[in-house]
Every structure is written in structure tokens, then in C-alpha cells.
Amino acid sequence: MKIVVLAGGLSTERDVSLSSGAGICRTLLERGHQAILLDPFLGLPDAPQNLEEVFSIPDAGLSIASGIKSTEPDLDAVRASREDKSDCFLGANVIDICRLSDIVFMGLHGDVGENGKLQAAFDILGIRYTGPSSLGCALSMDKEITKVIFEANQIPTPHGTWMKRGLADHSLASCGLSLPLVVKPCSGGSSIGVYIVHTEEEFDRAVTESFRYEDEIIVEEYIKGRELACGVIDGKALPVIEICPKNGWFDYANKYQDGYTEEICPARIPEEIADRIQKAAEAAFRALKLDVYARADFLLTESGEIYCLEYNSLPGMTAASLLPKEAQAAGIEFGDLCELIIEKSMDARYRG
């Protein structure tokens, strides 16, 4: 198959996405596919005159992936590096190259790519893509909407509220919640802009910092517990994985720097609790109108209560990512996982 792996973009998870995309692209090449790694924002301004030739360029576009740093990427520098300086998200030749492919493998994380906008555009343009539909991506990307849907479907989730930039009152008192709290962007990922606060001063600072990333933020009760995740493929839950940071909590650095975190799969939890988490993951998957695959994040308290925090519609596919490790525990190696995602995406939308 001719496959475009889209990765990068303008999300704060840009570096993570490029690493995911590079791993996917290499695996697809090893399996005999004609694959190319393409950044949807920077595009391919120096593409060959015959665009069909992009599927046989020597490095398959892999040179654009340079690894994940311990800090978030400089998106202003990325914008400045684009040759045409256009305000269009999609760079040179991106649409035309995607239209030449048999399917686009969505290796994007966060913002455009995971919020459903690009999927909706591809639906209109007749471009096939992997992963959930535009609706599932849109619902799961917005943590405010996710929380409302969870509560309506009796899926346990921390109590919370939201704030919008421009409203007069962003005070702790206006939330109706008690410290400690978690403050985070409404649609962010990879724990960027997430703060655990214990004092009113910390709260005010966290609100200010979170508004640097987005116009809406979530404030929710802090739940102390073990960090777990559960991927779902084609509606069926994978084994639950436990995340054990060596220091602190599962923030951006702990997620992606080698040796910072230990992941244990299957998680060391009673079978009854694992079953509850898997059932909750499957129920939330359905409630959010997701299809193909996605991954839910959970907390488990000492008393055995579980809380579903959010859903990732395009979960990481790096060497350190959770979903590939869960799939491996279920007997699905990385290359087979990539092929399975393509097959289930074709089944979901493109086969009768």
C-alpha cells in the first residue's frame, strides 16, 4: 500500500508525534509498504514534479524526526521556519500527496489532528485515514465535553468545572471546589500545562499558566491514586497497564525520557479491578462515539475506586508509549499493531 504517515504539526505534542510517526513509518517500510513521513504543517515544498515519486524518496521523509526533548517544542520557531508563511495549517503539497495514498496513517497528537478537524476535512476530500472518526476525535479531545458524557453514562470521573479566558472571575472561590485541585488545558495532552495545586497562590499561578496554552481550562478535584491506562481496539479492551514514575507524577519529562518511568503490563492489580477498568474503558469508548482504537487514562485509589480521567483518540506510538506495550502484552507486536489499525480503519469506514 502507499501510505502517508502524518506527524508533527503545530501541537505542543509535536516532538512526540514525530517520534510516533517515524516508528510507524519505519515499520510499514519493513513490511513492504511504500510509506513516507510527512509533516502536515511544513509540507513538502521541494517535492518531485511527479508527486508519485515521493513514495520512493531515499529517506522516506524520516529526517524530519529528531527525537523527543525533555521540554515542549518551540512552536513559534516552527511557524517561522515555514517557507511560504501562509496562514493555512496544511503546507505545500500535503493534500495532493495524501490523495495519492491508499490511506493516511494519523500519527498526529493534540490540536489539529486529534481534535477531528483534519479527519472532517479528509472525509470531504475523500482521503482515507486511520483512527477514530471526526466526531469521536472532537468529543474526546474536549475534556469538558468528555466529563459531561462520562457523568451522563455513569462512568466514574473526578468532579470538576471549567473556566474560559475573558470571564471576569477566575478565582478559587468561583470554582466551588476544595483544594487540592488539578488545573489543566481543556484540550491538551502529554500532561503539558497540567498543575497539581495545594494553595490558593498555586491555584492562581496555575490558572495563568494553563491559559497560556488554551482559551478554556479544566479545574477538577485531585484524586490521589495509582496511574493506569487501558487501550481499546475495535471496541475491545487491552490489558491494563500501570505507570510508575520514579519521581513525581507522569508529567511530560517522565512520559518520554528513557528511564524516568516504569510501565508494568498487565498491571499489578486484582483481576476484579482490572475487569472494572476494562469495562469502563469500553463503555467510555462507546459513549464518546470512538471507533478503531483509542486509550483511556485512569486513577485507582487505595480504597479500590477507579476514575476515568480522559480519552486519547490518537495515543502515542513511540517506543515509550503505553498502547504498544499493552498490545504486546496481548500478543500483538508493534508491526502487527500498525497493520491492525489500518485494517480496522478500513473496516470502519471504507468497506461495505
Image (tube, rainbow, N blue to C red):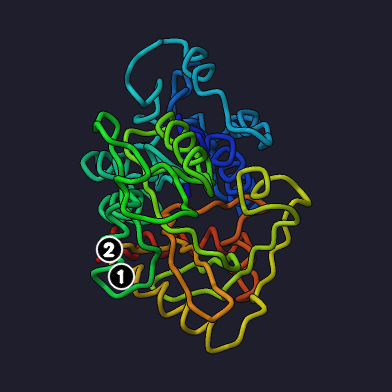
* Residue depicted at x 34% and y 73%: 155
Q: State the separation of the CA atoms marked 1 and 2.
A: 5 Å
Q: Is residue 127 above or below residue 139?
A: above
Of residue 180 and residue 317, the one placed in the foreground of this image is 180
**Which residue corresponds to the image point at 34% horizontal and 64% vertical from the top-left?**
291
Q: Nearer the viewer, residue 233 or 76?
A: 76
Horizontally, residue 199 falls left or right of residue 116, namely: right
At 50% from the left and 63% from the top, the residue drawn is 223
Q: Is residue 34 visible?
A: yes
Image coordinates of residue 142 in percent, x first then y, are 32, 49
Q: Amino acid at mark 1?
A: Arg
Q: Secondary structure at mark 2?
A: loop
Give the residue type that dot 2 points to.
Answer: Lys
Crowding at dot 2, Cα within 10 Å, few <14 / some 14-19 / many 20+, comes out as some
User: Is 49 drawn above or below residue 203 in the view shown?
Assistant: above
Residue 69, horizontal then vertical, whole percent: 68, 34
Q: Is residue 48 visible to the viewer in this orientation of the structure?
A: no
Q: Is residue 165 above or below residue 241?
A: above
Badge 1 crowding class, 10 Å Cα cut-off, few under 14, some 14 to 19, many 20 or more, is few
The residue beneath circle 1 is 286
Q: Is residue 166 left or right of residue 218?
A: left
Judging depth in this view, the residue of 207 and 193 nearest the camera is: 207
Does the residue at mark 1 contact the one at mark 2 (Cβ under 8 Å)?
yes
Label number found at residue 289? 2
Quarter where residue 67 is shown: top right
